[in-house]
Image (cartoon, rainbow, N blue to C red):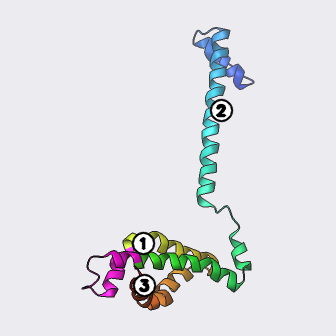
Amino acid sequence: MPQYNTAVDASQGAAAAAGLTASDSHSYLQAGKGITIMVLASLLSTALLVAVATEPLDDSSAATHLSAQQKLARTELLVRSATDCIVHAVAADPHYATAQLGDLIVESMPSCVAPVRAMIDAYDHYYGEGSGEAFFMGPYLDVLPKAVAAGVRTKP
């Protein structure tokens, strides 16, 4: 078996064994480099995509340096957005006049999942993991029926 010093020597030896000329083997080497570059580019772009998809671009530790007033201001808009969505869904329900308010609120959740999820995620971000669900299941749901009733009354 022949000994080769480089990959180029090995590929030229394989080309000769296959009956290819030097110009043929040079073309195949160039094509091989192109394929290698395409594979490396694909791998690099995939690695970049995975890194971006799994890691936040912002420094989440910056949220811990905000004052309580700043955190409240940032989450208040999302709380209002989630509540407005629920009020709108309840008011638009054809059974509003005859159904229980609590049932209507529960029925509105699928159509308001995006703003509710954003609110919960913001609480997790600003106040710590798990605080969003605790806020939603506790204080938020405690006052939600009153907020929805008041919001529906003021809707035109």
Q: Is residue 31 or residue 111 the one in the foreground? A: 111
Q: Mark 2 — residue?
A: 37
Judged by its main secondary structure, the magenta piece is: helix
Give the number of the mark in front: 3 or 2.
3
Q: Quadrant of the N terminus?
A: top right
Asked if marks 1 and 3 touch (Cβ < 8 Å), the reply is: no
**Given the image, on which type of amino acid does mark 2 rest?**
Ile
Q: Is residue 40 visible?
A: yes
Residue 21, above or below 41:
above
Q: Which residues are magenta?
A: 88-109
x 68%, y 70%: residue: 60
Q: Is residue 27 or residue 107 the one in the foreground? A: 107
* Mark 2 secondary-structure assignment: helix
Give the number of the mark in front: 1 or 2.
1
Q: Mark 3 — residue?
A: 154
x 64%, y 27%: residue: 34
Of marks 3 and 2, which one's residue comes earlier in the chain?
A: 2
x and y percentages locating residue 154 in the rendered image: 42, 84
x 35%, y 78%: residue: 91
**Given the image, on which type of amino acid does mark 3 rest?**
Thr
